Amino acid sequence: MGRRAVTNPPPKLGIIAGGGAAPRRVIEACRAQGRAFFVVCLEGQAEKTLAHDAPHIWLPLGAFGRLKETVAAESIAEIVMIGHVRRPSLLELKPDWLAVRLLAKIGFNSLGDDALLRSIGKVIEQETGARLIGAHDILGGTVMKPGLLGHIAPDAQAEQDIARGISVARALGMADVGQSVVVQQGLVLGVEAIEGTDALLTRCHALKRDGPGGILVKCAKPQQDDRFDMPTIGPDTVRAAAAAGLRGIAVESGRTLLIDRDTTRQLADEAGLFIIGIG
């Protein structure tokens, strides 16, 4: 009889968790795969109940030294940074001695959001020895594909708004400002800055015009590292878009995480919103 092949288990994963539902999806994926994991919940960012039933620790974003110690103590070999992270002030960051030294080196206040995340990611790899990977490496087939997600399609006006939104979103990305823009009938109702997509949608609700609703367009920044801060949509995005009076969501295919695909599609169809992946 031949020997049965031995499959090595995947390396232990450290999940650096920000806000929103995406970190929970990574936890669920690890459990489904039988993969060992440990959650680093970021104070003031992650949901309070995120890891109540999972091995975890709460740390401020600036606790580089304790993060390094945790990675070593937990034998973490790979790290994923997932979830919305609101850029903190230096006071909120609560930097320890290692963070102060490293942030002074990379220039905290001189960097845009994506450049800062890339720099922090590089520091994490260098200081901990763990390999930084993207959430899509864990979640598998949840990256948005080209074309429609549900049964509703954009009309001619919506297609014009999508094209306008792509142009503006690309310009935002080049300036390392944000990923999202809301366009209605050719008018830019709002662009994403530090507040995040949900706050953008809330703000745009008060600015909407009469007639066909606006479109949320999300694109990755041209210089963005897809291992973290990929554009993300899911059920919460659909609910917020519907509450804001929008009629559609257009996201960059291949570079946008899709959380809970079936629920997202169902909610969009029920709300009369289209979701489309754009090339």
Image: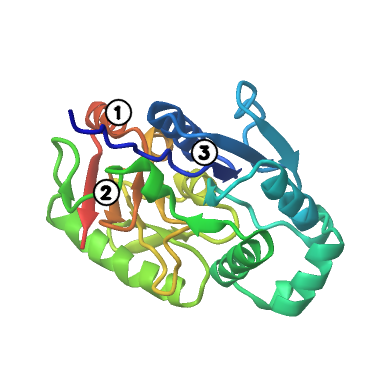
- Which one is earlier in the sequence, the residue at label 1 or at label 3? 3
Q: Secondary structure at mark 3?
A: helix
Of residue 210 and residue 8, the one placed in the foreground of this image is 8
Which residue carries the number 3 mark? 23
Q: Which disc number belongs to residue 267?
A: 1
Q: Residue visible at 70% across and 77% down?
A: 106
Q: Secondary structure at mark 2?
A: loop
Which residue carries the number 2 mark? 144
- Which one is earlier in the sequence, the residue at label 1 or at label 2? 2
| Residue 186 lies in quadrant | bottom left
Q: Residue visible at 52% across and 58% down?
A: 132
Of tags 2 and 3, the one toward the viewer is 3
Q: CA distance from mark 1 to mark 2?
A: 16 Å
Q: Is residue 163 above or below residue 36?
A: below
What's under tag 2, amino acid-wise? Met
Q: Position of residue 108 (x, y in %)?
A: 72, 72
